[in-house]
Amino acid sequence: MQINSMAPRWKWKGAEAKALAEPISKSVSELQLSLAKTESSGSLSSCNVLLAVEPEQAELLDRCCFGKLVLSAEKVKKWIQLSFEEAFYLLYILKCIKLSLRGRCLENEVDTWMYMRSKRPNFPAFFKTYSHLRSKNWVLRSGLQYGVDFVAYRHHPSLVHSEYSVLVQSGDSDRLRVWSDVHCAVRLSGSVAKTLLTLHVSGNSNREDLNLPTCLENYRVEEQTISRWSPELSREDETTSPTPKVTNVSNLKTP
């Protein structure tokens, strides 16, 4: 089912043409080859990853919207700060970087997975959400300033405004179960010209399975958009109750 959402809001004339000429998927493929060739390595901290790259790779990372540049006086190398989701996507999905912890190289993805889970127990659900949307070529950034988990763009943020404010819900989550929470989230998203998109992550993994990143294969993601019902935009003969409109979108359109 296709999402009934706002049309893309391009930031300048010609931005849409530029986006079509330079698809994110093509840039990600270039980045993957470049990072794998140089065996780029990042250092884990308690909440993010610092990745050392060549200047050309820093430009590729920016084009693909991975991380943010850390200003430094060093000219030979550039430092990029990645979130846990971004770093694990490059490590586990694209297999193009290595990670180390306190100077020790982590030999496999399991060590990295367990470390990130130890720092953020909800990491599996958040990474599943991140990888689910990234695989459809949506660009994700932190949604902290909008009171959500992520904001989703159909291309680089320099070309287009974000279209969705994304909330992650897992089996043990109590988010949006109270009417006032739903109302606040919908109104806030609408006030910044975004559509609220919730992703329900569920699976049958037990506690032992969660120690391995392969548990992600058992997770299922259900997409829903929630929009505010507006009586002014409704037909006079409709008897719909004034509640938010919920749309199942199990096949979110790839930009």
Image: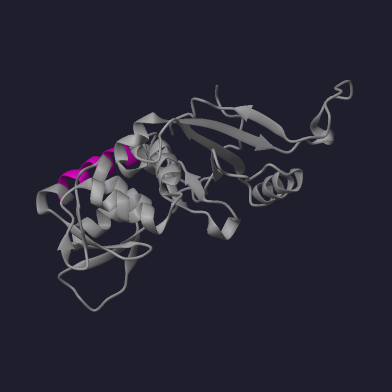
- In the image: residue 60, left or right of residue 8: left
Toward the viewer: 204 or 34? 204
**Quadrant of res 29:** top left
Residue 48 appearing in the image: yes
**Quadrant of res 229:** top right
Q: Looking at the image, how many numbered discs can be counted on the residues?
A: 0
Q: Residue furthest bottom?
A: 73
Magenta stretch contains residue 30: yes
**Magenta span main SS:** helix
Magenta stretch contains residue 17: no
Residue 63 appearing in the image: no
- Which image quarter is the C terminus in? top left
Q: Which residue sits at x=18%, y=55%?
A: 106
- Which image quarter is the N terminus in? top right
- In the image: residue 149, left or right of residue 50: right
Which colouring convention does the figure follow?
one colour
x then y, percent, for residue 137: 38, 37
x then y, percent, for residue 212: 30, 41
x then y, percent, for residue 36: 14, 48
x then y, percent, for residue 209: 34, 37
**Quadrant of res 81:** bottom left
Q: Which residue sits at x=44%, y=47%?
A: 140
Q: Is residue 155 above or below residue 101?
A: above
Toward the viewer: 10 or 179? 179
Q: Which residues are magenta?
A: 23-34
Q: Is residue 50 above or below residue 160?
A: below
Q: Which residue sits at x=40%, y=44%?
A: 124
Toward the viewer: 101 or 228? 101
